[in-house]
Each structure stands twice: as C-alpha cells, then as structure tokens.
Amino acid sequence: MNPTICVLGTGWAAEQTAARLKAETIDVLRIAPTADPSAATADAEPGVIPAYLAAIQADPGRFTIHCRSAGSSAVYEAQAIVIAEQAQRVSRCAGYGLSGGGHVLALADVIRESRLLPDDKTVVFLLGLAGESQPVVTREVLDLACRYAGRGRAYLLIGNLKVAGQGLEALVQDCRTAGVVPIKFTQTHPVIRQTDTGVVFEFTDEQIGEPFTILADRVVVDESFKPAAALQGIAGLLRLETDAEGFVQADNVHRLPVLTNRSRVFVAGPGRGALATEQVLADAANVALEVQQLIRETSAAAAVSAAIQPGHCVRCLTCYRVCPYGAIRLKARPEVLPEACQRCGICAAECPSKAITLADVADAVILDRIEAFRRETDSMQAPFIVVFGCERSAGLCRDAAGELGLPLPQRMCFIEVPCAGRISLDFMLGAFNRNAQGVLILSCHEGNCHSGQGNLHAKRRTAYLKEMLATIGMKPDRLHARTLAANMPVEFAAVCREFEATIHSLMLS
Ligand code: SF4
Ligand code: SF4
C-alpha cells in the first residue's frame, strides 16, 4: 500500500515539500494548521485542508490526526508527518527606538518593493544592533545594501554579526567594493533620533575615535524570525523538542537536516529556523529521501525495539516521561511503538520494575558477557576494567583505535551500548559484582547526545553510585565517567590507559 504522508503547514515550504513527495509518487495529505479553532475556515489553497489540530495520536505504523474545521470534526490517518510551517518576520524597529513607516522601512517591504528606496538618497541599513542577526537576514540586508550602493549613499551599521561560513564574508567584501560604508559597533551604540525629515545617527567611530553624524533619508531595519503561531501547538501535540526560540529540532546536530526527536516526524524549512530558499528546497528533497527510506525499513523495526513485560509493569509511567522519542503510548498500560523506538535503552535503565527489555542489550546478556570475559582473562595480572561506551562515540573510537593499532588496556572488557542512557546502575553494579576492579563510563559530549539527555542520565547515575561506593567503603575512583566525540580514537585510548593506571595504583594503595 502506498503510504500517506501528512504535510502540516501553510505557504511555500509546505507547497515545495508536498510537490517533492508527490514527484516520488508518495500520497500527500496537506493540512494548514491554525492556532485558533475559530479561524479554521480561513481561505485555503486548493487541495489544502485548513484545520485546528485537536489531537494527534501515534499508533503502530500510523498517526491519527483529529481536526476541527468550520464547526465540524474530521479524522485523518498518515504514516508519517512533515512539519513545513512558515516562520514569521518580526521587525526590530522597537529595539532601535524607531517607529515604522515614512522614512523607516521594514526589510521585507524593501525586498518586495525596491522603489521604496529612491535614487540619490542617504540610506542606512541596520543589521544586528538590536540582537544577533540570523544568517538569512544578514544575507538579505547585505544584498540590498550592495545593490543600493550603485544608486545612492549606503551606510551599513553593524552590531552582533556572524559572518563566518555561508559565504557572508565574501558578501561583506562585495558591499565594500560596491561603495557601501560599513560601520561596526562592538562596545558602543549609535544615538538614534527619528525626525520629520529622516533619522539622525550620532556615534563615535570605534576604530578612529572620531565623532560622526549621519542624516539618513531612509533607514532599512533588519528583522528576526519567530516560529509560526501554530508551531507551538504542533510541537506540544507531538511531544517534539524545540529550541529556545520555539523552532523544532532543538539544536541537536544528530537531527540535521530534517529529523526530529520523533520517528516518522520530519521538519522541512522554516519550522526548524530561519532558512534561505535553497535550504528549504534541500529540506524538501531530504524529506523525500527520508520517507523513501522509512518505507523500505518499516518491516525491520519491530525486531530491535524495546518491549514491556506486562506482568512486571507497575504503571509508574517513568518510561513514558523519559523516552526522548515519544515512542511509548499510554493505553490501558504503557506500550512501545516499535517503529518509533530508537533503541536508546533509557526506559530500560530507568524502569524501577525492570519490566523493559531490549533484546541485544538486556541486563542478562550484558552481565553474562562481562562474566565470560572475566573467566577467559582470569589468569591475567593486569587490572580487570569494564568500559561501557556509547556506540555513536566511544564505539567508533574503539574501532578506529584498533585500526590505528593504538595500545589499549590488556584486560579491558568493552561493552557497546546504543546510548549512554542505557548504562544502568545494574550494569555498573553488575560489573563490580563480577570482580571488575574499575568501571569506566564513556558517553558523548554534553549537548551532543543523539537522544538528547542519555549522556546526562549516565552522568547522574555515575555520580550517585560513586557516593554509594564511598558509603560502603569502596574507593569511588574505581568508577569514572568521561565524554568523547566519535573522532577521538587517540583520546579514547589515552583515557582507557589512564584509567587502567589509576586502577592499578588504587589496587596497590
Ligand atoms: S517504567 Fe516500567 S513499571 Fe513504569 S510504566 Fe514503564 S514499564 Fe511500567
Ligand atoms: S528504548 Fe529509548 S526510544 Fe525505545 S521506548 Fe525506550 S526510551 Fe523510548
């Protein structure tokens, strides 16, 4: 059966995404979500359902979308959801103490209508003086200033600006070549006065220390982007992580370009931030690729997901709260959605009733491996250490260290886990109970965990167990936690050897 993909959003990004999916012969359901139930009758594009989203329910293999529109209700089903909402432009006039209109022009208006800037005038372009500028906005302002410089006097008053990468440095240089006068403010701020005839800027140049005044006939004010009003509601319904501004994707590099923390929920275009046109088109293409891959992989999902043993579950809902991928749904009892589960194991490590299993990293499997390693290496004199490491960082480091021939501790049992969040207290204690002299926990760097907080769970458990070890008279340094990135095999080998040396000296003391 051809799957139906629901594209949620209004405007160009949604249009492009839907067109790209249709080009791959994927059935598309387009819904234009409104933040307000009474506004759901607003004019819609052909083939687009304007609706207030009342609920979205995740069931095995599909989402059920409950909509309200024009006083009636409707329910739709889709195998995956793509959020392709627009972002809203917000003028920064207030940040400069300016009122829009007359001599003070909004960036979007000038982009639409270049005639708003007459020839032979003095035009000041404001950029990043009232808050950090987003790269898309920076590019738009620099483009406009560059083009106007051939028609009149163009000043560019720049504040907090990131021009590294993305070709912006070259654009700043183009502006200079075209005759734009850039003035940068790092410590100071211009005094800005709006008059009946224009806008006056008074400032002291930070480079040469000389006072200057610019009488501007027109001022083009930069803008920022904020998420569409409906995005917050969508994120809430789907339990999606958002960044500080409310865009979906939550600054997690593992989710770039179009993934979210939910399996089968993608984000394309301005729903994930302020993006240039070419990035939106690339997102549409990437979503189409992800959807095709998802169709291919669906049948394999159940084999590797977490499973809840009904007889053991006491319905504490811990798993529902901690699952970073929204893969547990609440029915009469919690159930894992196999295709949404990304096998991080956080739920299994946190479940107080040990009711959750993950086949290849079940407690018994891991502890048996440690026991088997202990027996096999019993005759060795070197300290017996167990290293638990995330497969996305330490696991890759271990493989690379092997290929590079880097020396590792002689009696080191390396246990690879899907996420450091799987490293439970039972794993750590189980290793000590099987005579490990040291236990090393290796997770991804903070802010770089695929599962968001798996590394923080591991860190918290390690700190807790170290205190416990001290209480029962064991040396807390026998347990240690470090973070690594996937491209740090040399550091991986060094950390393991240092830990072996620490354990060696602890055993002698
Ligand atoms: S954490 Fe364990 S006991 Fe609690 S609801 Fe989930 S499966 Fe049941
Ligand atoms: S293993 Fe991870 S993704 Fe799967 S249900 Fe448990 S917490 Fe959620």
Image (cartoon, rainbow, N blue to C red):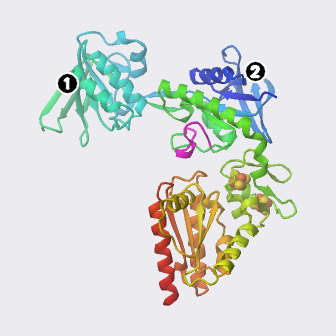
Whichever of callouts 2 and 1 sits on the residue coming sooner in the sequence is: 2
Predominant SS of the magenta segment: loop
Task: Report the residue at 75% width, 52% height from top.
Answer: 305
Residue position marked by numbered label 2 in the rendering: 70
Percent coordinates x, y for residue 371 in the rendering: 70, 76
Residue 496 tag number: none
Residue 461, compared with residue 134, is above or below; it is below
Splitting the image into 4 quarters, where does residue 66 fall? top right
Amino acid beneath label 1: Ile
Q: Nearer the viewer, residue 336 or 414?
A: 414
Task: Report the residue at 13% width, 33% height from top.
Answer: 211
The answer to whether 106 appears left or right of 496 in the picture is left
Percent coordinates x, y for residue 31 in the rendering: 70, 25
Asked whether mark 1 and ligand 2 are closer than 8 Å, the reply comes as: no
Amino acid beneath label 2: Ala
Q: Which residues are magenta?
A: 247-260
Whether residue 316 appears in this view of the structure is no
Q: Nearer the viewer, residue 116 or 14?
A: 14
Count residues near mark 1 (Cα–Cα under 10 Å), then give few for <14, some for 14-19, many for 20+.
some
Percent coordinates x, y for residue 403 in the rendering: 51, 59
Residue projecting furthest to the bottom: 509
Q: Secondary structure at mark 2?
A: loop
Q: Secondary structure at mark 1?
A: strand
The answer to whether 67 appears left or right of 289 in the picture is right
Residue 298, compared with residue 313, is above or below; it is above
Residue position marked by numbered label 1 in the rendering: 214
